[in-house]
Amino acid sequence: MLTEVFSSMEAEADFDVEDSRSNNELQELWPVGEIDPKRGRFPCCIVWTPLPVVSWLAPYIGHVGICQEDGSVLDFAGSNLVSMDNFAYGSVARYLQLDRKKCCFPANLAAHVCEWSYKHTEVGTATSWDGALQLGTRHFQHKYYNLFTCNCYSFVANCLNRLAHGGSAEWNVLNVAALVWLHGEWVDKMSIVRSFAPFVTVTCIGVFMAGWSFLIGISAFCLLLIGWFVFAVYCMKGLVC
């Protein structure tokens, strides 16, 4: 009799775990619309656009946002401000669509499909893509914007950690930037032009007026900028959001 009771309890426990995992899989498989740059719709994408002045000197730096399942863009545009469908600094130039199957939407601790279950829970979990983005939005609506410590990349990294995208809860400003630049796609040829034309123009004018010392100066600026984020992210834990 006792053996039957224990067997029944184990079967129910196994069913609960399997059921929660199957629910997780069903949530990931909800269909999303097509990418439509003309309407500014990029479902489940990270989007990027060049920044005025800053991108003229360092074209790899830009403004990023992350999109909901309906394609609307969310971006940390200023202190206590997360914009929706009002992408700061212009239209999207580059995008990367993420696979929801690589995310973790646990209904409870036992339903985690990532290897970072406790870290993921600590960061904040959600049962859907949009739910994770909403939590990230609420968090950054109380943050002060700072280019060096709390910026738009911080917001996207926070959302990716809540999603546990790629099974990781260790997203930061550096690997988000690398992800977009290494795997992102350009919207069209004009996006490439408006992203690099100012940099090329400024560089040509600088070399013409100041000679090769201008290139040395701009290279030093880029190295210092990258060096700051490497130091702040990996050596000063918690300094960068």
Image: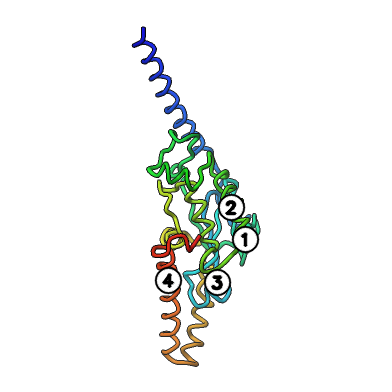
Kindly identify which residue carries mark 4: 226
State left or right for residue 238 relative to residue 72.
Answer: left
Q: Please report whichever mark, 4 or 1, sits nearer to the chain's N-terminal start.
A: 1
Q: Secondary structure at mark 2?
A: helix
Query: Which dot, 1 or 2, sits closer to the camera?
Result: 2
Whole-angstrom CA distance, mark 4 to mark 1, is 25 Å
Q: Amino acid at mark 4?
A: Ile
Q: Please report whichever mark, 1 or 3, sits nearer to the chain's N-terminal start.
A: 1
Whether tag 1 and tag 2 are in contact, CB under 8 A, the answer is no
| Residue plotted at (51% across, 58% down) | 95
Query: Which dot, 1 or 3, sits closer to the camera?
Result: 1
Q: Please report whichever mark, 3 or 4, sits nearer to the chain's N-terminal start.
A: 3
Kindly identify which residue carries mark 1: 87
Whole-angstrom CA distance, mark 2 to mark 4, is 26 Å
Crowd tier of the residue under label 3, counting other residues whose Cα lies within 10 Å: few below 14, some 14–19, many 20 or above: few
Whole-angstrom CA distance, mark 3 to mark 2, is 32 Å
Crowd tier of the residue under label 4, counting other residues whose Cα lies within 10 Å: few below 14, some 14–19, many 20 or above: some
Whole-angstrom CA distance, mark 1 to mark 2, is 19 Å
Depth check, front residue: 189 or 175? 175
Q: Secondary structure at mark 1?
A: loop
Query: Which dot, 3 or 2, sits closer to the camera?
Result: 2
Labelled disc at residue 194: 3
Whole-angstrom CA distance, mark 1 to mark 3, is 16 Å
Whether tag 2 and tag 4 are in contact, CB under 8 A, the answer is no
Q: Is residue 184 above or below residue 118?
A: below
